[in-house]
Image (spheres, coloured by chain):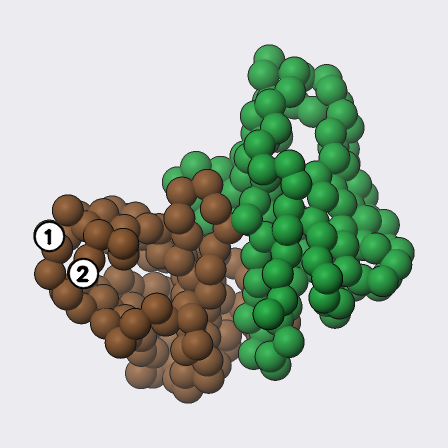
Amino acid sequence: GAGVSQSPRYKVAKRGQDVALRCDPISGHVSLFWYQQALGQGPEFLTYFQNEAQLDKSGLPSDRFFAERPEGSVSTLKIQRTQQEDSAVYLCASSTTGFSGYTFGSGTRLTVV
Amino acid sequence: TQLLEQSPQFLSIQEGENLTVYCNSSSVFSSLQWYRQEPGEGPVLLVTVVTGGEVKKLKRLTFQFGDARKDSSLHITAAQPGDTGLYLCAGHGSSNTGKLIFGQGTTLQVKP
């Protein structure tokens, strides 16, 4: 597609529920990043893929967070046993290389109640 | 740990006024990027500055990279309501993964 597509746009989860957030990057983009953004704040790095390889997951806040990109294109961020502090906007970005400008998706707003 | 501090955090001005947003760090960055984000959307890249002392202009926006590559500024001339949004500076971290470190952002409101 022309841009980075994320789904769903909005997700409400009950505390303890598992959620899966999807990212469709721009076709051919090698690098894919996931960020977490609190309201009115800058995005914070979660994890990075180069093709299907997860090269950096240092930003994942706990072992409840898991990301995959099995075929080097679509990526899924999974959060198990969601907690209220997981409420945020989750942004996906892709780029041709890790050091060029990113193209961000519109994000998924997760609300845990 | 590399950090980027933006100031001010919030700015509310009248249409036609000028403003400057600052992005500072104690660390050297190989490049800095500026993004603009509107509510409900992802950040959109405005510019990348690479060389110390570099100045780039994008219509009414002027971006400068400090000589020591530790700081950057964004100046907007004759602000318009369409400039309203969250402005973010970002730099590549010390790892080789291309991971971007973002400042906390400056929320700009331009009133007509």
Quadrant position of residue B84: top right
Q: Colour of chain A?
A: brown
Q: Determine contact: label 1, label 2, CB under 8 Å.
A: yes
Q: Position of residue A56 (x, y in %)?
A: 46, 80
Residue assigned mark 2: A82
Quarter containing the N terminus of chain A: bottom left
Number of callouts: 2
Task: Determine whether the residue tagged by mark 2 lies in a helix, strand or loop.
Answer: loop
Q: Position of residue A111 (x, y in %)?
A: 23, 47
Vertical comparison of B54 with A100: above or below: above
Q: Of A16 and A18, which appears nearest the observer? A: A16
Q: Of B68 and A56, which appears nearest the observer? A: B68
Residue assigned mark 1: A14
Tell me which chain the residue with mark 1 is part of: A
Residue shown at 64% from the left, 76% from the top: B94
Quadrant position of residue B20: top right
Query: Can you name the residue that lies furthest to the top here?
Result: B112
Amino acid carrying mark 1 in the image: Lys
Residue at mark 1 to residue at mark 2: CA–CA distance: 7 Å
Q: Position of residue B103 (x, y in %)?
A: 59, 52
Residue shown at 11% from the left, 52% from the top: A14
Question: Which chain is green in the picture?
Answer: B
Instruction: Count neighbours of disc 1 (C-alpha within 10 A) and say few if under 14, some if 14 to 19, many if 20 or more.
Output: some
Q: Identify the disc placed on residue B86.
A: none
Residue shown at 27% from the left, 56% from the top: A86
Mark 1 or mark 2: name the one nearer the start of the chain.
Answer: 1
Instruction: Count neighbours of disc 2 (C-alpha within 10 A) and say few if under 14, some if 14 to 19, many if 20 or more.
Output: many
Vertical comparison of A14 with A22: above or below: above
Side of B61 where B84 appears, left or right: left
Would residue A4 be visible to someone looking at this image? no
Amino acid carrying mark 2 in the image: Thr
